[in-house]
Amino acid sequence: MANIKLGKLKKRNAGDVIFDIIIAITLIFLVVVTVYPFWNTIAISFNEGLDSVKGGVKLWPRKFTWQNYKVLFVDDRLFKAFTISVTRTVLQTVFSVFCTSMLAYALSRKEFVIRKPLTAILVISMYVNAGLIPSYMLIKKLGMLNSYAVYIVPCLVDIFNFILVRTYINGLPDSFVESARIDGANEFTIFLRIIMPLIVPSIAMISLFVAVGAWNSWFDTYLYCSGKVNLHSLQYKLMEFLQSSQNQSSSAADANAMAVAASAGASTSMVTPISIRASITMIATVPILIVYPFVQKYFVVGMTIGGVKE
């Protein structure tokens, strides 16, 4: 009897080991598939431009150089654009999170009699909008063309983030608000001192959403601020730089000629669209990668609690 049980135990353990191996292989494969493109982009960004045209750069730069990044940062306008993107990201995140959270609190109060119609209007606007031309005309009528305000004002409230924060607030006990009112606190004090500290995970989550969107945005600069160089964002400048680099090598014949020159031992200090594209990707990605680990735990909690309504 003991031998039978031991045989079953061994058989079960062997099955578990095989299952664990399959899971480990699957996860390793997913990690490789996810990490390799990013690592390959890093390698290309540090590889000489003409050498990158020949292909074959995998995990490590074949001919290491800083030239790709030097070309991008040699222009002072890039630093100005970087400043615009940083200040825009910070201000847009702060104002958008504050206004969205305040609106979510107001429309989560049961005593606010028109909260359901207003919420319905806001949700409908998330699916149906006027379009590009009316939006441009509205910005023009408001006098925000070629002004810094166009980066902040149209983004004060995000409907998707509003829904997440309102759902999170609805999950809080009403006794917090009621006890604060008994103590004489007004609605704004309740929002700042009671509600805001309790919805930190939700705030961190939508802050990440807003910050990533603001940092990566360039189309609004193209539409509303293309005529004012001092307001160009980093992403818009990088897009312009990439386009100009691609124009320098717009045909396959040019690419082949550069590859032949590189293989012949010619000077390889020249950058190419491939190397510039990789460098631009790194510049645009690294700041978000630095910020994300600090808000990851709040992001997970916010998505789990704020995304479910019992």
Image: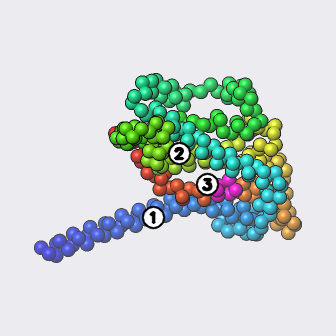
For disc 1, the marked residue is 25
Q: Residue at x 39, y 30 (%)?
A: 110
Q: Position of residue 230 (x, y in %)?
A: 80, 44
Give the mark nearer the N terminus: 2 vs 3. Answer: 2
Asked which secondary structure carries label 2, the reply is helix
Spatial CA distance of label 2 from label 3 is 14 Å
Task: State which region is magenta.
Answer: 282-289
Label 2: how many residues lie within 10 Å, few (<14), some (14-19) or many (20+)? many
For disc 3, the marked residue is 288
Asked which secondary structure carries label 1, the reply is helix
Q: Return the residue found at the far front.
A: 184
Give the mark nearer the N terminus: 2 vs 1. Answer: 1
Label 1: how many residues lie within 10 Å, few (<14), some (14-19) or many (20+)? few
Spatial CA distance of label 1 from label 3 is 29 Å
Residue type, label 2: Ile
Q: Which mark is residue 206?
A: 2
